[in-house]
Amino acid sequence: MGVVITRNNSSRVSRARIATIATASIALASGSLALAAPSQASAPAPAAKAVLGSHPLWATHTADQGTAPAAATFTGTVYLAMRDSAGLAAYAQAVSDPSSPQYRKFQSADFVRSHFGPTDASIAKVNAWLKGAGLSVVSNTWHAVTVSGTSSQMAKAFGTTMHEYRVAGQEAHAPASDVVIPADVAPYVLGVADLSSTLGNHAKPDSVKVNSTIAAPGSKTGGGLPTTATCSDYWGQKMAKGAPQGYVKGAVAFDQCSFSPAQLRKAYGITASHLTGKGATVAIVDAYASPTMLADANHFSTAHGDKAFRTGQYREVVNQAQWNSQQACGGPAGWAGEEALDVEMVHGLAPDANVVYVGANSCNDNDLSAALANIVDNHLADVVSNSWSEIMHTTDQGDMSKAQIAAYEAIFEQGAVEGIGMDFSAGDCGDQSPAAAKTGVNCQTDTARAQTAYPSTDPYVTNVGGTALGLADKSGKYGFETSMGTLRSSLSTDGKSWTPLPGTFYFGGGGGTSEDFAQPWYQKRVVPSKLAHTLMTGQHSETAQRVTPDVAMNGDLYTSVLVGLTSNGVYSEGGYGGTSVSSPEFTAVQADAIQAQGMAIGFANPEIYLRARLGVFRDVVNEQALHHRAPLSNVADFGVIGGQLRVRLAAFGEDTSLQATRGYDDATGVGSPTAAYLRSFLP
């Protein structure tokens, strides 16, 4: 097929060899990590603190409609400052670094709070300040306090009134000026967020249903192609002999039928490993919750020859009374496909792992971070799958605040200290550039420039990118992989050509060099220096930067996976694609690895990059691009839908500016896991 996979080392890798490499790597200095005692030196008197950017730039004088009505209520989130954020980061690195004496000496949430978190006294002062202004506390943890109140109450607390604005035809609200934190509580407050309307900048699922991508008019004649949906059990089983010429002369393959969990288990070596995730617990975070999730997962599993969940193996942490922002976020129905995909993929690839679904109260950052905080505060899982993301830099001043990012990172670092790994999908819009957003099916159109998504780019999470997987037989034997990046063309109305050809960018795994985060210690000596020093805008960075993804697994829309769910009372199954597939796939692999070694892995990236040097990942390479050949392509024939024949030509490995090259790359990271990766965790 022209796609060559190299460095597939199937031999067992000894822990002794891993330890040898870890010792030789650049990591923390040896010696014990001492916990500093609180400073006894006198500190300067605190001053009031303005929260820069809390008055958004879109809230202009021209757009201002005046003070909000007296009866209107608003909500906001106050993020609490850690007592010792530097100490938390250092401890998170120490327990995650195989060369550190503290490696895998995981601690409890109480340990994190007592050594690094805010004190009870500081939390009490913040609550007294907010309640003293008349605000009602909606939720209250040692990470954040969410409050609600009227414009006058907000003004008393934050030193600014709430105004209404009309922006690009939308009604919105925001503080009339930047929020000011009083001097007596300023040292205890990290920042304030969510007082303004989001204007569409919030987390979204990184998945797309196949049928939702074929609404454009197609051909009635078909030009000799079948008028019923046609797909192959494996790559090349059926050839599209009636199709017009595309990128190459002669017939190309029909696309593969959506994969079942059994096929994926075999392709990625899980079947050969005999691992099932037994003893591990996986958490899944999405927004809201489907009322039929357990029934759907069991229906799907048994329909495909797998086991249903045992009694007590699956549970949910959901608070429907607190759901909000349903119109902006799509509500439960808008997230149901993502939830079903995540739960069924984890159960399919780690069938004996316990699964806990934690439904955030909305797709807003305060609610998603609260769901994650609940997991680490109560140690609900060993590893967490998150199939959502958002861009950090927008054209409409909807950038993520520094307070939100710092609050997320503290949660991720706490998870690392406790031995909880965090996996995030890389996104489905390639390099997230404005050019990609013009034609991509799952992009944010307000992207300011090529960039990486968040939280997936955070140095303390595992960023899972996407590939396109080709099977060698119906059972799921591995054939090849290339990067997840699709150009799409449609069959012309007369059925004699593809329009346009070459196709336009449609779908691609996220990745790239972050402008926001410096290179973490575990990427040194693995990520090419040129890549780490070249931003996605093409600018040179004096400092080495974080590059993503870390790993990759199947997720392309045209190598989709089957998902079953109930909609409007009817159960059905359909194909889904996206790095939202890749993330739960890899999380399930990690659950299997936890079973293999008999203990938690924790923050996985240091282990991933060490093992990459041992050849236990497949180096996914786009050989067509490497040798300047025509891209790998196939024909997706969905049959007649709505009176029209829906036929597409998909070209693979075309992931915007991201390239799958030999070694680490910004399209697939270190590559995809193998049976050798799982065996490397065995004693």
Image (cartoon, rainbow, N blue to C red):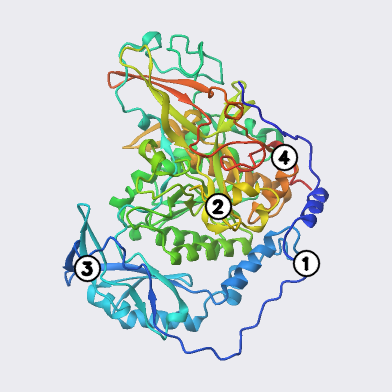
- Residue 262 appearing in the image: no
Amino acid found under the numbered disc labelled 3: His
Amino acid found under the numbered disc labelled 1: Ser
Amino acid found under the numbered disc labelled 4: Val
Any mark on residue 616, and which?
4
| Cα distance between the residues tagged 4 and 2 | 32 Å
- Which residue is label 1 attached to? 30
| Cα distance between the residues tagged 1 and 2 | 33 Å
Find residue 497 and report its horizontal and vertical position in percent. 38, 15
| Cα distance between the residues tagged 3 and 1 | 55 Å
Label 3 or label 1, whichever comes before in sequence order: 1
Which of discs 3 and 2 lies nearer the camera? The answer is 2
Tell whether label 1 touches label 3 (CB within 8 Å).
no
| Cα distance between the residues tagged 4 and 1 | 27 Å
Any mark on residue 163, and which?
3
Q: Secondary structure at mark 2?
A: loop
- Which residue is label 2 attached to? 540
Label 3 or label 2, whichever comes before in sequence order: 3
Would residue 14 be found to the left or right of residue 541 on screen? right
Q: Secondary structure at mark 3?
A: strand
Of residues 553 and 649, the one drawn nearer to the viewer in this rendering: 649
| Residue 655, above or below 152 | above
